[in-house]
Image (tube, rainbow, N blue to C red):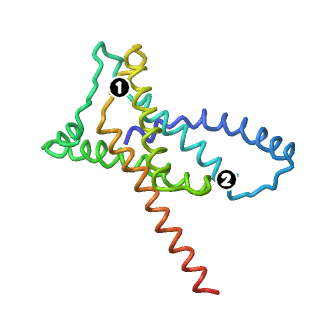
Amino acid sequence: MKYINDIPIFIIFITLVCYVPIRILYIKNKNLDIRVSREITFIVLITYAESLLYLTLFPTASAPSNTISINLIPFQTIDLYLNYHGNVTLQIINLLGNVVVFMPIGIFAPLLLTKITFMKILFIGFCSTLFIETMQLILSINGVVSRSFDVDDLLLNTVGVLSGFVFWLIFHKLFQNMIKSRS
């Protein structure tokens, strides 16, 4: 669980110290109503996005290598981890971790966007993970980090976004039913 200890708390703090006053000025300048829950959601989203970018782009303990790893064959890496008979933690981090870490995107999207659809979520999920995988490749090619481009990460991350959206739909429906039953 080394990744969790590496979250750049200081960078997140600096970003929020800059964001909050700018956001307050923007709201006052545009004469907008402040919805505290929405503003808190934005702050949590910023914290999540910075953590996600840090975890996916820079969590390597090793120095950048001269080899670039690219997997364009769907399910090759997934199959490798499913049939791996070594460290179970490695399997969980690489399979389940790739799903779970992207679930918040599927939760944030319907909280912040109106008229969200399954196709929009699919698009958001695919594009966000494609961006990260492409950045990993570019940074690796330029010798900044030692990461890989893996189509299976695209699949698992997108499934994570979709899972977060389904989780939100279920929670939202249960919450609406609870309110209706109390009225």
Placement of 101 over or under 151, stated as above or below = below
In this picture, residue 37 sits left or right of residue 171: right
Q: Secondary structure at mark 1?
A: loop
Give the percent coordinates (x, y) of residue 107: 51, 55
Q: Amino acid at mark 1?
A: Arg
Q: Which residue is painted at 35% across and 17% down in the image? A: 64
Nearest the camera: 138 or 14?
Answer: 138
Q: Which mark is residue 169?
A: none
Q: Amino acid at mark 2?
A: Ile
Nearest the camera: 45 or 17?
Answer: 45
Give the percent coordinates (x, y) of residue 104: 49, 51
Q: Which residue is painted at 33% across and 28% down in the image? A: 149
Placement of 111 over or under 75, stated as above or below = below
Q: Which residue is mark 2?
A: 40
Give the percent coordinates (x, y) of residue 70: 28, 25
Q: Which residue is mark 1?
A: 147
The tag earlier along the polypeptide, 1 or 2, is 2
Q: Which residue is painted at 35% across and 18% down in the image? A: 63
Q: Which residue is painted at 35% across and 39% down in the image? A: 154
Q: Quadrant of residue 73?
A: top left
